[in-house]
Amino acid sequence: MKTRLVLDTHVWLDWLVFDDPGIVRIRNVVGTGRAQACIDAVCEEELVRILARGFAKRTLDARAQAECLATCRKFATRIDTVAPEGARAALPRCGDPDDQKFLEAALAADAHCLVTKDRKLLELARKPGVSFKIITPREFETVRLLHG
């Protein structure tokens, strides 16, 4: 079994747009197949929206947006199932309701880690009802990968 990860939108942007050195290990372990990045339709839709909206000092033309999305789809496994309602209801509530989708995606993917920079999500790391780690990209540096 490989280590399964769900990356929030900020982490995907660091990979796809900003080439952030802080996520080199994530990019390397996913790129070499030692870990599996997972994404569902809801999280992908948010990524598409953010790529189209642009950023404070940078906008992406349609071609660059398509390339980012193609890279995401190349390296991410699509989650087409939804966790059962009871399991989703047992998850802690994120202080930012818009970020609940990442918890639900991690649950549906049976992920080992949700990798995020979001403070509201990180606050839930030690709450009951979370069957996966909620960690920053920096914390991922020390995660032991499963082999399989």
Image (cartoon, grey):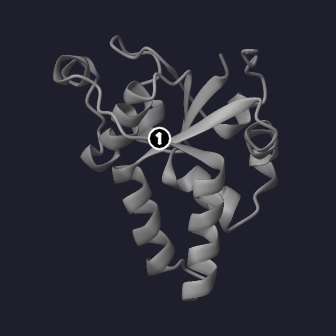
Image location (x, y in percent) of residue 80: 37, 40
Residue at point 73%, 15% (across, down): 148
Decide: few, some or many residues near mark 1? Use Cα within 10 Å; few <14, some 14-19, many ≥20: few
In the picture, measured across the screen, residue 138 lies left or right of residue 80, that is right
* Depicted 12 relative to depicted 88: above or below: below
Q: Position of residue 133 (x, y in %)?
A: 54, 21
**Amino acid of disc 1:** Arg
* Residue 84: quadrant of the picture: top left
Residue denoted by label 1: 119
Residue at image point 40% right, 70% down:
49
Residue 86 visible in image? yes
Examine the rendering and report whether any part of residue 58 can be seen.
no
Viewer-proximal residue among 91 and 83: 83
Closer to the camera in the image, 84 or 91: 84
Numbered-mark total: 1
Q: Which SS class for mark 1?
A: helix
Residue most extreme to the top: 128
With 106 as the anchor, is 6 left or right in this view? right
Give the answer, above or below, for where 58 lies relative to 74.
below
